């Protein structure tokens, strides 16, 4: 009987020992990253052209606002301010001295330290035979204590210029920032006396 009990105890221990060692080996996160490539790890996001333009426009508007608040927080006469200003000018197709007047004046008068863009939508307006591209968005300004100073609806006119002969690559430029959309003619239709 003692032999049978020892044998049963031995088999139970042997079974437990082999069960612990036969655990399926899990692949660590580091091994997964090491052996992966972009095709398997990250699914490709498909965007149509309007979604891509919307995304790029929102990014460019936010970057320009960030640069503007950064420029205003400086002395406006140092080398770094000059670099920031020239970087802001690179967002515009033909920058001139009036390019930033409205934007900087508004940011300065509100004493805004940061700005956040939301609800951006791109749309087209037709003027005579031209098609004009606009972005309509909300911008919320914040002070140095991150307190909201208000949210405002703004417009920006932009252009996409082809940069290659294949016409698949474009360069984004603003034509006018914080622009007012063109007003439609207010001439009434009908008989006038």
Image (cartoon, rainbow, N blue to C red):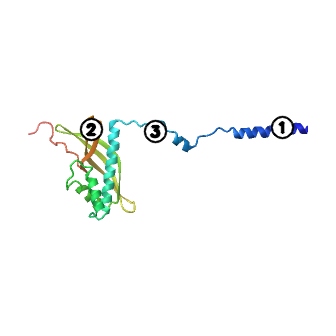
Q: Considering depth in this image, is 136 or 77 the residue closer to the camera?
A: 77
Pick the quarter of the image with the C terminus.
top left
Q: Quick check: 8 left or right of 166?
A: right
Q: Considering depth in this image, is 1 or 139 the residue closer to the camera?
A: 1
Pick out the residue farthest to the top: 166
Work out whether mark 2 precedes mark 1 in sequence or the reverse, and give the earlier one.
Answer: 1
Q: Position of residue 149 (x, y in %)?
A: 34, 59
Query: Residue 8, which numbered label?
Result: 1
Q: Does any portion of residue 139 appear in the rendered image? A: yes
Pick out the residue farthest to the left: 193
Please report contact status of discs 3 and 1: CB closer than 8 Å, yes or no.
no
Pointer 3: what residue?
38
Q: Position of residue 169 (x, y in %)?
A: 29, 38
Q: Residues within 10 Å of mark 3 (few under 14, many from 20)?
A: few
Pointer 2: what residue?
164
Q: Is residue 63 above or below residue 166?
A: below
Alpha-carbon distance for marks 2 and 3?
Answer: 27 Å
Secondary structure of the residue carrying tag 3 is helix
Q: Is residue 164 above or below residue 76?
A: above
Work out whether mark 2 precedes mark 3 in sequence or the reverse, and give the earlier one.
Answer: 3
Q: Residue at x 29, y 59 (%)?
A: 107
Q: Considering depth in this image, is 68 or 188 the residue closer to the camera?
A: 68
């Amino acid at each position: 009987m003692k032999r049978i009990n020892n044998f049963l105890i031995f088999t139970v221990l042997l079974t437990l020992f082999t069960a612990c060692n036969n655990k399926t080996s899990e692949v660590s996160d580091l091994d997964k990253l090491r052996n992966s490539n972009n095709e398997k790890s990250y699914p490709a996001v498909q965007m149509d052209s309007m979604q891509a333009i919307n995304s790029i426009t929102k990014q460019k508007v936010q970057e320009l606002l960030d640069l503007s608040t950064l420029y205003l927080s400086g002395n406006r006469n140092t080398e770094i301010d000059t670099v920031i200003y020239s970087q802001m000018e690179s967002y515009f197709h033909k920058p001139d001295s009036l390019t930033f007047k409205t934007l900087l004046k508004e940011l300065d008068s509100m004493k805004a330290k940061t700005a956040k863009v939301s609800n951006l939508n791109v749309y087209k307006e037709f003027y005579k035979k031209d098609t004009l591209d606009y972005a309509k968005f909300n911008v919320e300004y914040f002070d140095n204590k991150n307190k909201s100073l208000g949210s405002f609806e703004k417009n920006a006119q932009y252009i996409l210029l082809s940069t290659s002969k294949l016409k698949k690559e474009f360069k984004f430029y603003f034509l006018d920032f914080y622009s007012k959309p063109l007003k439609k003619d207010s001439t009434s239709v009908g008989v006038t006396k």
